[in-house]
Amino acid sequence: MLNEDELTRYHSHLMLDWFSYITQTRLKRAKVLCVGAGGLGSLLLLYLAAAGIGEIGIADPDTISLSNLTRQILYQTSQLQQSKVQAAKERLEQLNPLINVKTYPEKIDNSNVERLIMSHDVIVDCSDNFETKLLLNDVCASKKKLLVMASALQHKGHFAVFDGYHVCYRCIFEQLNITHTSCHENGIISPLLGILSSLQALEVLKFYAGKDNIRDCLIEYDAMALEQKHFKLSANPKCRFSHPSRPAASIHINYKRLASLESLGDKNYLLIDVRSEREHQHDNRGGVCIPLSSLKAKLETFSRAQMIVLYCSSGKRSLVGCEMLVDEGFTNVFWL
């Protein structure tokens, strides 16, 4: 359940038709691992913390250097030589004290990768080297974990989401002769990292909202031309992993929408206006007024056998209220 502080903090997300109360409670229970706390990780971590991801793991062995600060906006000049994961933890918990941040000041390798990945729901690859990306891909592909990947150099970046079905990162790049390059050697325009990490954060939130992620597609973004290209991906038949077809998603919603009060007829139901007292007095359409922020406290007074109908001005708050009731086990719930 969400308390009143959480309902207020996450209000702008709760008003979205596709996000709502149930998604926010999923975020509260979510466990996301960010591998790399550099240019990509900096903005990603801020968005995940602000959105209310309940547990955020950060894996990075490095300390903060002066040359990091043009693109790693999570850190300050006063934090030079400090551990990145510890500095990130302090900043994120200041931003949102309701979350838990776990730190892993270690390099991802064969000795720890499976342990870290299996203790999280979603893995976000913000690393800056090809070897780490392949290692994360291999474990995520074998364990069917969602991997949200991004990389950038100079003014171009790439972004993709892999779930272990159909296609993986190794399908694309294993046959390529790649020479290791870095931002330090070749440079990078800092805002490009913000664009890519924002896409990563968005795909994480969509995952917990039950929305389809952008899969089987590689996105290339050119910051100088402001151009975005989509490349359809297919599994490499020589890939070491078998890529079966992805199972169809199934999301069951056990509340219904009513077109009007008249459609209820003479049925016995409890009608609740979840708008504010002021809105109710100005435009009273019947029923009792229980503002959305107070609905949770009133749940014990409702009969689970009775039909419950919620309404507001646009339908958004009543939908959030319905999802709140469904999350608490109510089944005979309707919204207008």
Image: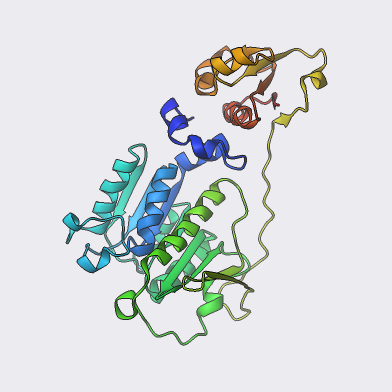
In the image, residue 136 above or below residue 206: below
Query: Is residue 108 left or right of 22 when viewed as pictured?
Result: left
Color theme of the render: rainbow
Identify the residue at horizontal 35%, vertical 57% (top origin): 42
Identify the residue at horizontal 68%, vertical 19% (top origin): 308
Query: Is residue 29 left or right of 94 when viewed as pictured?
Result: right
In the image, residue 282 above or below residue 104: above
Measured from the top left, where is residue 111 in percent x and y?
Answer: 34, 66
Tell me if I can see residue 142 in this picture.
yes
Query: Is residue 80 left or right of 45 when viewed as pictured?
Result: left
Would you identify the image quadrant in which residue 291 lies? top right
In the image, residue 95 above or below residue 228: above
Q: Quadrant of the C terminus?
A: top right
- In this rendering, the count of numbered labels is 0
Would you identify the image quadrant in which residue 238 lies? bottom right
Measured from the top left, where is residue 35 in percent x and y?
Answer: 38, 61
Identify the residue at horizontal 57%, vertical 72% (top origin): 241
Would you identify the image quadrant in which residue 5 lies? top left
Near-viewer residue (35 or 280) = 280
Measured from the top left, where is residue 270 in percent x and y?
Answer: 68, 14
Identify the residue at horizontal 73%, vertical 30% (top origin): 257
Measured from the top left, where is residue 72 in percent x and y?
Answer: 31, 61
Near-viewer residue (102 or 221) = 221
